[in-house]
Structure formats: C-alpha cells, structure tokens
Image (spheres, helix red, strand yellow):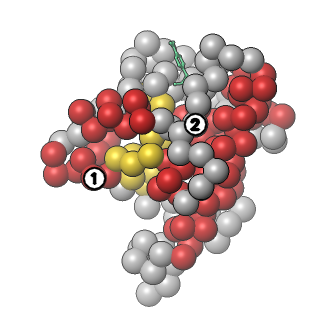
Amino acid sequence: MKLLVVCLGNICRSPMGEGALRARIARSPLAGRVEVDSAGTAGWHRGKAPDPRAVACARRHGVDISGLRARQLQPADFLRFDHILCADPDNLEQARALAPPQARARAALLLPWAGVTSASAVPDPYYGGEADFEHSWTLLEAAAEAVVRRLSAAPDSGIIGP
Ligand code: 4NP
C-alpha cells in the first residue's frame, strides 16, 4: 500500500502529514507494509527542506521531518500510489486536474478519507503562526491515527490477513 500526502507547497502540511503518518504506522501492525510520501501541487519550493516552523512543530511532537525535500505532484504519481490524499479542496481540485482519467478516483480529501469527522480540510498554516502549525499537526495526527484504523480494518486492503 502506497500513500501520497498532498498540499500546495509541500513544505508545511504534507511533510508534517508524511511525518505523522510514518511515525504512527511505524508503531502499528502495519509497519513495513505501507509506504508514505508527500508532494505539492505547486513546484515553487522544489528541492527545499520543510518550512522551519513545520520542522519545529513536528520536533515538538517527537518526529524529525528535517530530511524531507519538497517535490511537485506528477501525473505518474497517480499510477505509483494507491491513494493521493489531499489536505484541502483546492489541493484536491489541482490534483484531479493532473490525474490520468483512469486514476482520478485515487485522489481524495485526507481527513474524510481517513475517517476524521472533526474537520474536512487541514488549513494552510503558511501565513500563520505557531498555533496554526499546532492546529494543522493535531489534524494530521488524528488523520494518521484514523488511517491506521482504516487500513487495519479493511479486509481487502491487501495489508492484513490472507
Ligand atoms: P503548504 O503551505 O501547502 O502546507 O506547504 C504553503 C507553503 C508555501 C506557500 C503556500 C502554502 N507559498 O505560497 O509559497
């Protein structure tokens, strides 16, 4: 199972989401069976490390995302990943516009797809402050928890069982 977390710049929400997911999966029975990556619909920050505020936020929660590097979402990602999980509706619209038609359904909104009900979008913290990064992290950590629950429960996920 391969999951791709997508936001706009790939320097705030999606690297935090990638970090939260990797950390949660690593201490679950899914460890070693799920690959996680992230990308941005825009290419402005290609090759750059996550925003220092995102790195600091993840670090406060025990997760090191400093080694991640930004990249832009590519049409080929829709063939490589099972699910393209978008932070907000704009990201979803941009991702779908790029998708090969037969793979368009692989794109979804992260929070509803995971089963989180407290919010449907992860708000962009880029123009905000530490509290906004913390709010995004809280949602992304809830998503990570819910993704593990969803994939562990799905009998047809190809992950657990015969
Ligand atoms: P992200 O946040 O989509 O969560 O990575 C942003 C990062 C950069 C910009 C906007 C949002 N920007 O305008 O450069």
Could you tell me residue 86's position as x and y percent? 45, 40
The answer, for residue 6, to whether it is visible in the render is no
Write down the residue under mark 1: 105
Rendered residue at 54%/67% (across/down): 150
Rendered residue at 46%/25% (across/down): 8
Of marks 2 and 1, the one in the foreground: 2
Q: Is mark 2 within 8 Å of ligand 1?
A: yes
Q: Nearer the viewer, residue 16 or 130?
A: 130
Residue 58 left/right relative to 70:
right
Q: Nearer the viewer, residue 67 or 51?
A: 51
Could you tell me residue 78's position as x and y percent? 29, 45
Q: Mark 2 is on which residue type?
A: Val
Residue neighbourhood size for the residue with mark 1, other residues' Cα within 10 Å, grouped as few (<14), some (14–19), many (≥20): some
Classify the position of the C terminus by image quarter.
bottom left
Could you tell me residue 46's position as x and y percent? 45, 18
- Up-down relation of residue 109 to residue 156 (above or below): above
Classify the position of the N terminus by image quarter.
bottom left
Q: Mark 1 is on which residue type?
A: Ala
Q: CA distance from mark 2 to mark 1?
A: 20 Å
Write down the residue under mark 2: 122
- Up-down relation of residue 157 to residue 137 (above or below): below
Q: Secondary structure at mark 1?
A: helix
The answer to the question of whether label 2 and label 1 lie on touching residues, with beta carbons closer than 8 A, is no
Q: Secondary structure at mark 2?
A: loop
Q: Earlier in the sequence, mark 2 or mark 1?
A: 1
Could you tell me residue 19's position as x and y percent? 64, 41
